[in-house]
C-alpha cells in the first residue's frame, strides 16, 4: 500500500496533483448514479490499491501545499508584510497566521532532530523565528506602508 511518505519520493506537487486528478476522475466516472448504473461503462473502476493511493495522494498534496504556503508566508515577512496583511491574505487573523507559522518552524526543527538532515538546525530555526517576529510587531521593517 502506498503511504504519503513513500509517494513523496516519487511525486512532485504537480505530478501528485495530476495522478490524483486521474484517479479521482476515474472514481467519479465509475460511481453509480441514482439508478445504480455507472456513468461510464468504458472506464474501469479503481482497484482497492488505487483507492488507497488516491487517499495517500490527497494527504501528500495537502502536506506539500501547506509547506509551500508557509514558505510563501516566510517570503512575505522577508518582503516586509505585517502579520495583519498575511492573515488577511490567508483569510484568517494575524494571530492565527503567526501561530500556524511558528508551529511550522517548530516542526522543521523537530524534523531535523529526527533525521539529522531534513528540516532546520538551530541556526535556521533562530533565523526563522527572528523573521517571524511577534504578531503585534509594528517595527518599521514589517509595518505596511502605502504601495507596499
Image: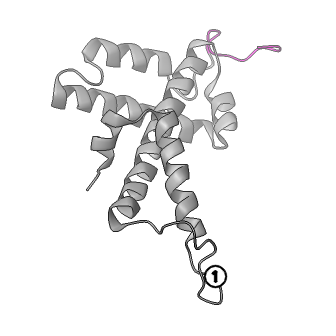
Residue 147, quarter of picture = top right
- Measured along the vertical axis of the image, is residue 61 above or below residue 139? below
Q: Nearer the viewer, residue 57 or 59?
A: 57
Residue at the spot 56% in from the left edge and 25% down from the top edge = 72
Residue at the spot 53% in from the left edge and 58% down from the top edge = 24
Most distant residue in the bottom direction: 35
Q: Position of residue 89 (x, y in %)?
A: 68, 34
Residue that mark 1 sits on: 33
Q: In which quarter of the image is the N terminus?
A: bottom left
Looking at the image, residue 8 sits to the left or right of residue 132; the answer is: left
Most distant residue in the right direction: 146
Q: Where is residue 66 in the image (x, y as percent from the top left)?
A: 48, 38
Residue at the spot 60% in from the left edge and 20% down from the top edge = 76
Q: What element carries label 1?
A: loop
**Res 99 visible:** no
Looking at the image, residue 1 sits to the left or right of residue 88; the answer is: left
Would residue 58 be counted in the magenta stretch? no
- Measured along the vertical axis of the image, is residue 90 above or below residue 135? below
Q: Where is residue 120 in the image (x, y as percent from the top left)?
A: 30, 20
Which region shows up in magenta? Answer: 139-148
Q: Which of 49 and 115 is in front in this view?
A: 49
Amino acid at each position: 500500500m502506498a503511504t504519503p511518505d513513500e509517494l513523496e519520493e516519487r511525486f512532485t506537487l504537480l505530478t501528485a496533483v495530476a495522478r490524483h486528478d486521474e484517479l479521482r476522475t476515474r472514481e467519479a466516472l465509475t460511481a453509480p448514479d441514482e439508478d445504480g448504473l455507472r456513468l461510464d461503462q468504458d472506464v474501469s473502476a479503481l482497484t482497492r490499491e488505487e483507492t488507497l493511493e488516491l487517499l495517500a495522494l490527497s494527504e501528500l498534496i495537502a502536506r506539500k501545499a501547506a509547506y509551500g504556503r508557509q514558505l510563501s508566508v516566510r517570503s512575505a515577512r522577508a518582503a516586509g508584510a505585517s502579520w495583519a496583511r498575511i492573515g488577511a491574505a490567508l483569510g484568517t487573523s494575524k494571530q492565527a497566521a503567526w501561530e500556524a507559522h511558528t508551529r511550522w518552524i517548530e516542526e522543521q526543527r523537530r524534523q531535523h532532530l529526527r533525521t539529522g538532515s531534513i528540516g532546520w538546525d538551530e541556526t535556521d530555526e533562530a533565523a526563522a523565528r527572528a523573521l517571524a517576529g511577534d504578531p503585534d510587531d509594528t517595527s518599521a521593517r514589517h509595518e505596511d506602508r502605502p504601495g507596499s
